[in-house]
Image (tube, rainbow, N blue to C red):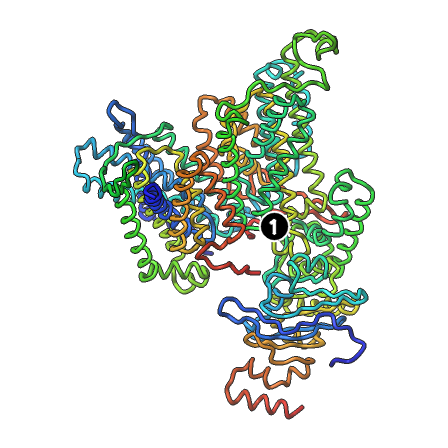
């Protein structure tokens, strides 16, 4: 960066040349892939030409690049003139917001989440509570994965496998052995955790990117097994008729059994199908809050600090006598356990599961929630889930653009704000009376 | 040099490290004593950091016996047989790195608390006691913070306790790394170029700190350093490596006048040799 | 026996395709030390571009097969290379020196983006393609089984051999190859000595993409159907091949590709076809546990 005081003359010709190059690249990218669409025709494939789309793409890239270059050339050259540096910027905006209002925001969100079914109006409709339940599943999954990716810095691309293990564990144990949800829930968590351990033990010694691809493969293996082990899992047909959970033994059915109560007779209420919907909502909310409580708590314990330390520098950890494999393994299997819990809930809520629900796309969505929210940020996960999952529920028509946008956002966030939109890290132990100075300076470090 | 009454903390015998065809360390033996500062010096590429990496379990030496006998314990640790993290955990050998390795996103205090991981893990009953906030864990954490504060006082970083480690200036980061290593309560502290990049004032402070660590805490220090003012001033004992071989071993006065050392540093030419010879004669 | 030889031929053909993709992984890994997760999708883009051009040529009345073949090859290589270049420029270059997970996540994002982009642009349905090059040799005609070696298989294997040889020469003899090897060793030093590091890395991505484009075209011609999802599995398998052979080593990538192709084919032939992908993943895990530096790779010395 030059330290010239006066702004240099903007060389329009150079900018134009740069924009032309960008436009040519855009032409190369789109001319075949967008310009010619293969369509099914009698007697083979035909083509549908969309040159106007190509022209639009090229023109917008040209103009966009030109404006960007113009902005880049005319903005103040001096660091002081330009305002906060990249690192300072990382501390402000989202992070600053969380620091100032994080507590209030959390309390408000929590209060709203608890009171929601009784607020009346649109909030108490079945549709809204269903969407809220759906969003909360993702919040829980996001919080679970956050332990693995955000705290321990292990990139797990097969998180959905543990979700699937939990779901199938409940579905199979309840349909075959008649075990109740409350009995299976801890079992499902333990099963998912032991799967995590089995997978993690051999690969956690390896470099981070190997772990990523092995978990990716593991997620696929689980799905392929679910798809092909027809006798056990029903293959692509899945498992249906999964029992619904009871309220401490009280069912939510309309029909009252001979010698017993249901939820509505016990509490002297009129039967309403909403009872179960609301109950399921509170159930997942409670599970999610337990996940959150656990994470917040464990961050302040030696194991949680060791996770973060491993994320920051594994070699330094070894020199301090921290066992890297065991420490990673706990993070990995605890994350898996929460995935298993969420899976059991998913199975009991849907009443039907099939391998369709556990594709790589699911893992990618959960990862996107964690990444966009800010690695390690609990509030970020909530915001990202509400926006990404709730948002796509609201705009159903744009469903097919959902993953496209997620992918693009993941790249953009990593380029622009690698530690996420809402990243602010509060130290887990504080020496009284000394100033707290924020902590995103580690951005540039390996 | 080898006066009686001193405790030989670390005995390295026939240490050899080969990377493929490259012989990085060739049959090096030396002893580091308790309550002494032992410096390892030598030109670039002499294999100094490799010695450290063998000692702290990052490399598995090709040949050699690295015996550590902590004082008053009567135990013997053969470091070449131990997995990396166990050397720090059980044998209590701590180290710093040539290119500083802190936990940049974590605060200064957290860096020091992480260093007391194993002790705190036990106190938290492997997380269970900690999860439910039992008193036993809270007491242990308080103690850990106290120890951390002590080392922050010693290194002059106490005011920065809640600052993120990554945002500290270079010199502070170097001292923080030493404080962090000391929080593991080592019997042997290995410092890889602690004075690199420090200004003269910081360098002098570092000397004081290291002497204090040696005298007040009674541990052995192993030091790799290029800055001769540091080495000559504070070392009790110097080992000189060149091309992976030990070429000299003795107290600073002896090393200063050893012709082999002068030749290694100044090159092979005649003048240097004569200069060395004259220097030796003058003694 | 005939059945075995037939599977051997099929396995070598499949292995050639995996090997070509694996080179892309291995080269990028060699030069910037990270896995290019989007590489499988680059391969998929190559297959799609080939398909579109084949259809376009068919509609334009180009029926002379060698000509069509050549045109498709060139266009696919050029367009896919543009994709490779753009991916590097947008998703990796800005992240050099960023924190450890950033380039990985950005690569995953890029992979998701490319898959969905192609799905939106070309539709989610499976695209069929009539066989272009048919026929071949049939020998050892037995009563119950005969071995066939199709022209397509001959073309795939010989094209792979030619490309591999050309590549080996390129890396060993040209200034570009020298620059690449220099960047692999020490990027900072290479830059100080006047190597344009950014350009060298870009070219590495372009070269990987070009080979992936050839692999994509061959995959299309060999199997006759593609969809936007093929890059995912092929990518993981090719990566497995790169790891198995020793990541960073070009001959290793080819060897690994052949092994994975053979294992997959024999597994399908003698065990169950449903679990053939499981076999590939299991090999990846086993390779990583027992020989993380692969068959032809060198153990990595950890820099402390």
Q: Is residue C209 left or right of residue B261?
A: left
Q: Quadrant of the C terminus of chain B?
A: bottom right
In the image, residue B142 lies at what x, y percent? 80, 48
Q: Is residue B60 above or below residue B235?
A: above
Q: Is residue A396 above or below residue C85?
A: above
| Residue sitting at x 70%, y 51% | B114
Q: Is residue A333 left or right of residue A237?
A: right
Q: Quadrant of the N terminus of chain B?
A: bottom right
Observer-nearest of A256 and B211: A256
In the image, residue C77 lies at what x, y percent? 29, 44
Mark yes or no: residue B191 visible.
yes
| Residue sitting at x 62%, y 58% | B169
| Residue sitting at x 69%, y 25% | A182
Can you identify the residue that label 1 sits on?
Answer: A312
Q: Is residue A370 left or right of residue B174?
A: left
Q: Quadrant of residue A377?
A: top right
Mark yes or no: residue C82 visible.
no
Q: Is residue A388 left or right of residue B148?
A: left
Q: Quadrant of residue B193?
A: bottom right
In the image, residue B177 lies at what x, y percent? 67, 59
State the count of labels.
1
Observer-nearest of B221 and A380: B221
Is the residue marked by circle 1 packed among few (<14), some (14-19), or many (20+) residues within 10 Å?
Answer: many
Q: Is residue B7 above or below residue C206?
A: below
Chain letter for mark 1, please: A
In the image, residue A74 lies at what x, y percent? 42, 46
Under tag 1, what secondary structure? helix
Observer-nearest of B203 and A406: A406
């Amino acid at each position: 960066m030059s330290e010239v005081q006066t702004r240099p003359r903007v060389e329009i010709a150079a900018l134009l040349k740069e924009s032309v190059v960008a436009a040519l690249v855009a032409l190369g990218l789109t001319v075949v892939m967008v310009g010619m669409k293969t369509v099914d025709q009698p007697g083979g494939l035909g083509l549908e030409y969309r040159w106007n789309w190509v022209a639009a793409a090229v023109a917008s890239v040209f103009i966009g690049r030109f404006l960007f270059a113009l902005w880049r050339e005319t903005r103040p050259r001096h660091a002081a003139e330009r305002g906060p540096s990249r690192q300072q910027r990382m501390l402000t905006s989202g992070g600053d917001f969380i620091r100032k209002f994080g507590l209030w925001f959390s309390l408000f969100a929590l209060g709203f989440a608890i009171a929601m079914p009784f607020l009346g109006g649109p909030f108490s409709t079945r549709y809204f509570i269903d969407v809220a339940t759906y969003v909360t599943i993702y919040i829980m999954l996001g919080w679970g994965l956050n332990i693995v990716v955000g705290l321990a810095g292990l990139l797990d691309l097969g998180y959905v496998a543990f979700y699937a293990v939990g779901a199938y564990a409940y579905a199979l144990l309840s349909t075959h052995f008649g075990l109740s949800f409350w009995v299976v829930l801890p079992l499902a968590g333990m099963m998912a955790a032991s799967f995590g351990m089995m997978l993690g033990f051999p690969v956690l010694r390896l470099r981070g990117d190997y772990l990523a691809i092995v978990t990716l493969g593991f997620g696929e293996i689980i799905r392929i097994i679910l798809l092909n082990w027809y006798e056990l899992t029903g293959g692509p047909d899945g498992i249906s008729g999964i029992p619904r959970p009871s309220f401490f033994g009280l069912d939510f059915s309309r029909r009252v059994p001979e010698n017993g109560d249901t939820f509505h007779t016990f509490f002297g209420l009129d039967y309403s199908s909403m009872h179960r919907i609301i109950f399921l909502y509170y159930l997942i909310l409670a599970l999610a809050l337990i996940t959150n409580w656990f994470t917040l708590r464990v961050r302040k314990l030696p194991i949680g600090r060791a996770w973060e330390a491993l994320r920051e520098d594994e070699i330094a950890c070894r020199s301090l006598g921290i066992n890297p494999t065991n420490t990673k393994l706990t993070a990995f299997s605890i994350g898996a356990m929460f995935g298993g819990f969420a899976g059991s809930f998913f199975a009991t809520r849907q009443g039907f599961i099939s391998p369709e629900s556990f594709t790589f796309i699911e893992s990618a969505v959960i990862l996107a929630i964690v990444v966009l929210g800010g690695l390690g940020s609990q509030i970020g996960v909530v915001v990202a889930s509400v926006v990404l999952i709730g948002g796509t529920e609201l705009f159903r028509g744009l469903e097919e653009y959902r993953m496209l946008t997620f992918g693009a956002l993941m790249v953009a966030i990593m380029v622009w704000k690698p530690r996420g939109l809402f990243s602010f890290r509060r130290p887990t132990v504080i020496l009284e009376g000394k100033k707290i100075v924020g902590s995103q300076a580690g951005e540039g470090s390996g | 040099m080898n006066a009686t009454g001193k405790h030989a903390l670390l005995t390295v015998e026939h240490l050899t490290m080969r990377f493929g065809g490259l012989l990085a360390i060739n049959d090096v033996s030396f002893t580091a004593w308790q309550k002494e500062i032992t410096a390892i010096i030598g030109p670039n590429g002499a294999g100094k950091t490799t010695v450290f990496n063998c000692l702290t379990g990052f490399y598995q030496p090709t040949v050699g016996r690295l015996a550590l006998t902590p004082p008053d314990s009567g135990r013997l640790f053969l470091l070449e047989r131990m997995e990396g993290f166990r050397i720090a955990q059980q044998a209590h050998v701590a180290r710093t790195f040539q290119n500083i390795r802190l936990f940049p996103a974590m605060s200064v205090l957290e860096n020091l608390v992480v260093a007391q991981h194993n002790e705190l893990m036990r106190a938290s009953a492997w997380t269970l006691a900690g999860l439910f906030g039992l008193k036993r864990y809270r007491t242990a954490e308080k103690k850990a913070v106290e120890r951390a504060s002590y080392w922050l006082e010693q290194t002059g970083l106490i005011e920065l306790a809640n600052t993120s480690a990554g945002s500290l200036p270079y010199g502070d980061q170097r001292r923080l790394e030493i404080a962090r290593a000391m929080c593991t309560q080592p019997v042997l502290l290995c410092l890889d170029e602690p004075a690199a990049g420090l200004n003269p004032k910081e360098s002098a402070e570092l000397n004081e700190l290291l002497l204090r660590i040696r005298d007040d805490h009674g541990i052995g220090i192993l030091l790799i350093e290029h800055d001769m003012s540091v080495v000559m001033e504070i070392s009790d004992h110097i080992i000189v490596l060149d091309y992976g071989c030990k070429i000299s071993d003795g107290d600073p006065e002896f090393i200063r006048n050893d012709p082999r050392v002068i030749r290694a540093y100044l090159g092979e030419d005649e003048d240097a040799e004569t200069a060395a010879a004259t220097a030796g004669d003058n003694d | 026996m005939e059945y075995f030889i037939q599977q051997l031929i099929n396995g070598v053909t499949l292995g050639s395709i995996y090997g070509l993709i694996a080179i892309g992984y291995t080269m990028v890994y060699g030069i910037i030390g990270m896995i290019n997760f989007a590489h499988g999708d680059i391969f998929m883009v190559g297959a799609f571009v080939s398909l579109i051009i084949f259809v376009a040529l068919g509609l334009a009345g180009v029926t002379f097969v060698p000509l069509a073949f050549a045109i498709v090859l060139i266009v696919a290589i050029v367009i896919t290379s543009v994709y490779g270049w753009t991916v590097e420029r947008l998703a990796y270059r800005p992240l050099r020196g960023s924190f450890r997970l950033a380039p990985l996540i950005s690569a995953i994002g890029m992979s998701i983006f490319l898959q969905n982009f192609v799905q939106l642009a070309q539709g989610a349905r499976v695209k069929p393609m009539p066989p272009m090059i048919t026929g071949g040799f049939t020998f050892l005609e037995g009563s119950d089984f005969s071995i066939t070696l199709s022209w397509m298989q001959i073309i795939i294997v010989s094209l792979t051999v030619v490309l591999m040889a050309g590549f080996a020469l390129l890396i060993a003899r040209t200034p570009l190859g020298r620059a690449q090897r220099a960047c692999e060793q020490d990027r900072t030093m290479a830059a100080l000595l006047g190597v344009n590091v950014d350009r060298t890395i870009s070219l590495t991505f372009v070269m990987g993409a070009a080979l992936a484009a050839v692999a994509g075209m061959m995959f299309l011609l060999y199997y006759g159907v593609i969809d936007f999802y093929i890059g995912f599995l092929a990518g993981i398998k090719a990566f497995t091949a790169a790891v198995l052979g020793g990541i960073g080593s070009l001959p290793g990538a080819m060897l690994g590709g052949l092994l994975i192709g053979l294992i997959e084919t024999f597994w399908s032939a003698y065990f169950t076809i449903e679990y053939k992908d499981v076999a590939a993943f299991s090999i990846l895990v086993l390779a990583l546990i027992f020989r993380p530096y692969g068959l032809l790779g060198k153990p990595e010395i950890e820099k402390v």
